[in-house]
Image (tube, helix red, strand yellow):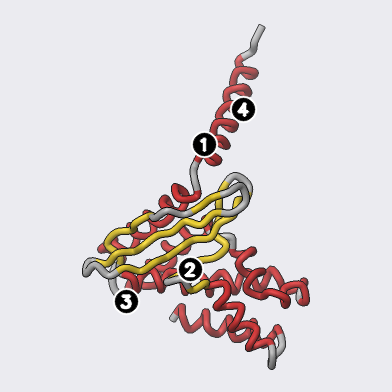
Amino acid sequence: MVTRKYKCAVAILIAAVLGADTLWAATPTEQVKATVDRVMEILKDKKLQGEAKRAERRERLRQVILPRFDFAEMAKRSLGTHWNRNPTRQKEFISVFAELLEDAYTGKVEAAKGEKVLYLNGHTDQSLAEVKTKVVSAKGEETSINYKMHPVGSEWKVYDVLIENISMVNNYRSQFNRVLANASFDELLKKLKEKNLRSDT
């Protein structure tokens, strides 16, 4: 005789399996679109407009952006050869870098003042994908923002962003290499923390 508890367990298992399949069924473009749509909603929200609402607006944006970006991978790629030279400071660097990148990305999106986002032909294989978009302003000005992605668990996550074909990861790697050529890793972290503090004020 099948018990009620057994039926519940089977139902939960089926739901979990279907949920996983649904996540895998979502393409990289669909997953980026879900995130970007929420970002645009926040930017267009009249209750969050203006400099007085900047801190609240940025926090809302961070809550949406955080799940879609693989900040650990981005931090690793941005440090390049310096990543493995400071293994005890990697978690700290990821945290500081994530805040820096979130602020830079949201600043770029805000500056684009997009009225709509166009999704162009990208490409996807089993391990990598690129989602190409254009943010179109009310004046018809276009800003290209492309997302390079890789699978993490059951989702596709962003490991680089190209704004007008300029890689954010490569740009940061060049900056960090210049700093570390004449300064210590501690000094780099201090500079990044100071920059994050300035952007929060």
> Three-letter amino acid code at disc 3?
Glu
> Three-letter amino acid code at disc 1?
Thr
Q: Position of residue 39 (x, y in %)?
A: 38, 59
Residue named by callout 4: 13
* Marks 1 and 3, how far apart at CA: 39 Å
Q: Is mark 2 on a helix, strand or loop?
A: strand
* Marks 4 and 2, how far apart at CA: 40 Å
Q: Earlier in the sequence, mark 1 or mark 4?
A: 4
> 44 or 156: nearer the eye?
156
Q: Position of residue 90 (x, y in %)?
A: 71, 71
Residue named by callout 2: 162
Q: What element carries label 3?
A: helix
Determine whether, in the image, residue 71 is placed left or right of residue 53: right
Residue named by callout 3: 51
Q: Which residue is drawn at 65% across and 84% down?
A: 177
Q: Which residue is drawn at 57% across and 78% down?
A: 172
| Circles 4 and 3 in contact, beta carbons < 8 Å | no
Most distant residue in the left direction: 139
Determine whether, in the image, residue 32 is placed left or right of residue 7: left
Residue named by callout 1: 22
Q: Position of residue 86 (x, y in %)?
A: 76, 76
> 3 or 139: nearer the eye?
139
* Marks 4 and 3, how far apart at CA: 48 Å
Q: Earlier in the sequence, mark 3 or mark 2?
A: 3
| Circles 3 and 2 in contact, beta carbons < 8 Å | no
Of badges 1 and 3, nearer the viewer stands 1
Q: Is mark 4 on a helix, strand or loop?
A: helix
| Circles 1 and 4 in contact, beta carbons < 8 Å | no
